[in-house]
Image (tube, rainbow, N blue to C red):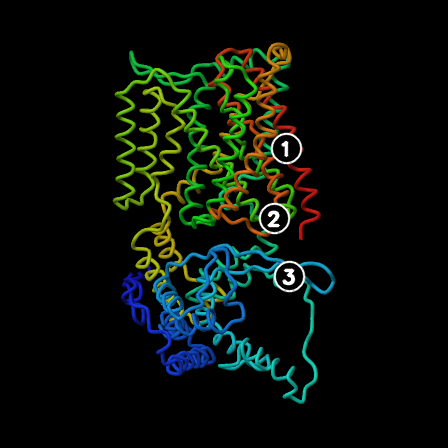
Amino acid sequence: MTGYSFSTPAVATGARNVNGPEDEAPAWDAIDWRAHEGRVRRLRRRIFKATQEQDWAKVRSLQKMMLRSWSNTLISVRQVTQRNAGRGTPGVDGQVALSSKARAEMTVQVHHTISTWDPVPVRRVYVPKANGKRRPLGIPALMDRCHQARVRHALEPEWEARFEPKSYGFRPGRGCADAIASLFTTLKGRSKRVWIVDADLSAAFDRIDHTRLLDALGSFPARGMIAGWLAVMGATESVQTAALDFARWAPSTGVLLLAMMLLAMVLINSPLGPAFLALWEMPVGWTAGERSFQLPLRAWIDDGLLSVFFLVVGLEIKREFTVGRLASPRAAALPFAAAAGGMLLPAALYLAIVPAGPLSAGWAIPTTTDTAFAVALIALLGSRVPVELRIVLTAAVVVDDLVAIAVVAVFYSSGLDYAFVAAAVAVTLLLSLLNRSGVYAALPYALLGILLWSCLHAGGLHATLAGVILAMATPTRPPANLRVLVAQAENVIDHELRRSGERVLRHGPSEDALRALDAIHDRIESPAAKLLRSIEPWSSYLVLPLFALANAGLAARDIVIAGHETLIAAIVVGLVIGKPVGMLAAAALAVRTGLAVKPAAYSWTQLLGAGALAGIGFTMSLYIGAKAFPDEGDYVAAKIGIFLASIIAGVLGCVLLRTAGRSAP
């Protein structure tokens, strides 16, 4: 077996080894632009020549040199912030650089994020077309535009050389900018030609096969950045499939939940009803001598398996708020505001309708959302729900779920054993210590998570809180030595290129190389990603359906509305009216005060429709109802209110989104 030595090139050791000045912003107006342009031009020619000679190891080495080049960064920032016509148009980050000082600072920022920058979502605007329709246009953030210019200088010469025998005009120094200059010359009458190409390619760029494009890039050093830009551009391919990276359980899980709910209804009202109810009360556990630990089967599902669901939810939302699409404060502010409004107003309406007394304990029932049902419906609505709206809705309802479990732990726990509570705090501190110490193996987190669940359960707190705590303590960011690991992967690929040349682009790496890359990937992947990959399918296709089967049953003989009209009305009003109005009002307030920005891709009416879907309570509402109402009659009435409100909210949300979707640009 051929071994690979993981020696680390200088570029991977940190920002100090990146080619060029490091920390001080340059004197922008005193820069010798001709010298820097010459360096970039000469390096482009070398990449072009190496590609013609099919010396792929040299091509990749020169491209890495271009990507690290201080001159390339200077030229790229100058092109984006000073020369381009769109230099004054901000992206979703609201950032522009129109002064010499701002451009100099932007250059340093771009250069120091060469290997660490993660693309951010584009700002969606709509440009009028000659036929009266409006064409969607994505405006990247300023940092993304600068990095794109850098990457273009490294990639364009290779593709110019590849196309050179078949296409006219592809030479070093004759790229897109030169084509624009040629068109300008023609239009000004300085050329004998009197025509240019005018074509409507029917959104051809939205139909680019991303997989094929990335395959064609081969081992290009900035391939990962290009994949990130494609992912955030919101092309047709991603709009059809993406609700959110952290909403992978839609829509099949929602359909499965509905099937389990109907099955529970049928079984509980059939001759098998008594046996079906007895099944969930069957004690399950272990016995060792005189010691035993047993819980009813329903309690294992509600307190045990549901912890897995909250772990998944917590990991997903933490990832999005730390390294995902909602990592910037302004991007995260809108779903946070919507979630807050969607919890506070329903609770207030419930308490305003229900008189003071035992029934007021159910105030938290209308504050929650069934994530699986809501995401399933927006996925089934397809392109009528813009991907930006899906992001906001899914983030908001996941925040709902996390707050709901905290509410259960604080307001619906009793009989605390402070010794076990202290032990749970100690385990939590140990999890935090693992995180801060850079422990990236998933097993220690999983074992401590089980211990934490046991301590919380024994301490009288709701044990599902363990899933949320474990999610918050599990690292989601790449390891601190990411650059070293990336450099090791590059060494493996470079070795393959030197040994096999262009054949590796057609047939892929050898088995030895794949093993080495697998080992590197295992060290790069964060514990959060490993846990998600392992447990997410179990949460979606086992935990949630079992919960629905165990808790959604409603026997017809138990339905007694008389005396519970107020409780049912409070739940329905809270979920059907409080949820959408609260989310819309809080989001509008956040936008008006400048705390958040609403993407132009969806209207306020569409946001109201998404808020209506958030009124589907079901899973968490049933869960809180069981904790709030020990009286069986009150709990049955709460179930009726939850089912009725969820049906109304689902229909209302779909109607609003379908209607608003037809009139959306």
User: Which mark is first along the chain, 3 or 2?
Assistant: 3
Residue 650, numbered circle: 1
Label 1 crowd (10 A; few <14 / some 14-19 / many >=20): many
Label 1 vs label 2: CA separation?
A: 19 Å
User: Which mark is first along the chain, 3 or 1?
Assistant: 3
Q: Residue at point 46% right, 77% down? A: 51
Label 3 crowd (10 A; few <14 / some 14-19 / many >=20): few
Image position of 386 with respect to 297: above or below = below
Residue 196: percent from left, percent from top: 67, 79
Say which quarter of the image contains residue 184: bottom right
**Which residue lies under the disc numbered 2?**
602
Dot 1 and dot 3 residues touching (CB under 8 Å): no
Q: Nearer the viewer, residue 658 or 584?
A: 584
Q: Amino acid at mark 2?
A: Tyr
Label 1 vs label 3: CA separation?
A: 33 Å
Q: Nearer the viewer, residue 608 or 370?
A: 608
Residue 611: percent from left, percent from top: 58, 37
Question: Element type at marker 2?
Answer: loop
Dot 2 and dot 3 residues touching (CB under 8 Å): no
Q: Amino acid at mark 3?
A: Val
Question: Element type at marker 1?
Answer: helix
**Which residue lies under the disc numbered 3?**
127
Label 2 vs label 3: CA separation?
A: 15 Å
Q: Amino acid at mark 1?
A: Gly
Q: Residue at point 53% right, 30% down? A: 345
